[in-house]
Image (cartoon, rainbow, N blue to C red):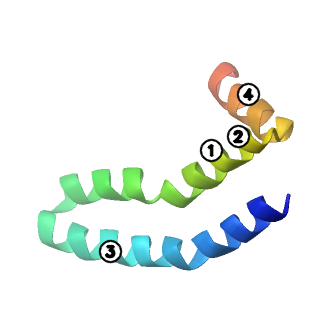
Amino acid sequence: MWVLLVSAGGLVPRAGLIGEATEALASRTGPGIGGLLHATLGNAAELIICAVAIREGFLLVKASILAFFLLPA
């Protein structure tokens, strides 16, 4: 549990840096590629936290991912 909390705390500042970097790239590449960058890199911190949580065996994360993919919108 502590490893997850410390890892998540370390990702928070990096998520801000990733957001600033994608905005800078999006302003140079245009709206199409900029939107793609925002969609992929904007969720990088969440994906890393999710991967660590699954590896540590947190069942709630597994259940929420299954619900996201299996339940209709």
Which dot marks residue 55? 2
Amino acid type, label 3: Ala
Distance from label 3 to label 2 (Cα)?
28 Å
Q: Residues within 10 Å of mark 2 (few under 14, many from 20)?
A: few
Question: Which numbered mark, 3 or 4, is in the foreground of this view?
Answer: 3
Please name the residue shown 85% across and 57% down the image: 1
Determine whether label 3 and label 2 are within 8 Å by CB.
no
Determine whether label 4 and label 2 are within 8 Å by CB.
no
Say if 61 sits above or below 67 in the image.
Answer: below
Horizontal side of 38 relative to 52 (left or right) equals left
Residue 28's spot in the image, x, y percent?
14, 72
Horizontal side of 54 relative to 27 (left or right) equals right
Which dot marks residue 71? none
Q: Which residue is mark 3?
A: 21
Distance from label 1 to label 3 (Cα)?
23 Å
Distance from label 3 to label 4 (Cα)?
31 Å
Q: Which residue is mark 4?
A: 67
Say if 15 sits above or below 73 in the image.
Answer: below
Q: Earlier in the sequence, mark 1 or mark 3?
A: 3
Amino acid type, label 2: Arg
Q: Could one spot residue 43 in this view of the protein?
A: no
| SS label for mark 3 | helix
Horizontal side of 32 relative to 66 (left or right) equals left
State the image quarter where residue 72 is shown: top right
Q: Earlier in the sequence, mark 3 or mark 2?
A: 3
Say if 21 sits above or below 35 in the image.
Answer: below
Determine whether label 1 and label 2 are within 8 Å by CB.
yes
Q: Which residue is mark 1?
A: 51
Distance from label 1 to label 2 (Cα)?
6 Å
Residue farthest toward the front in the current orientation of the protein = 3
| SS label for mark 1 | helix
Amino acid type, label 1: Ala
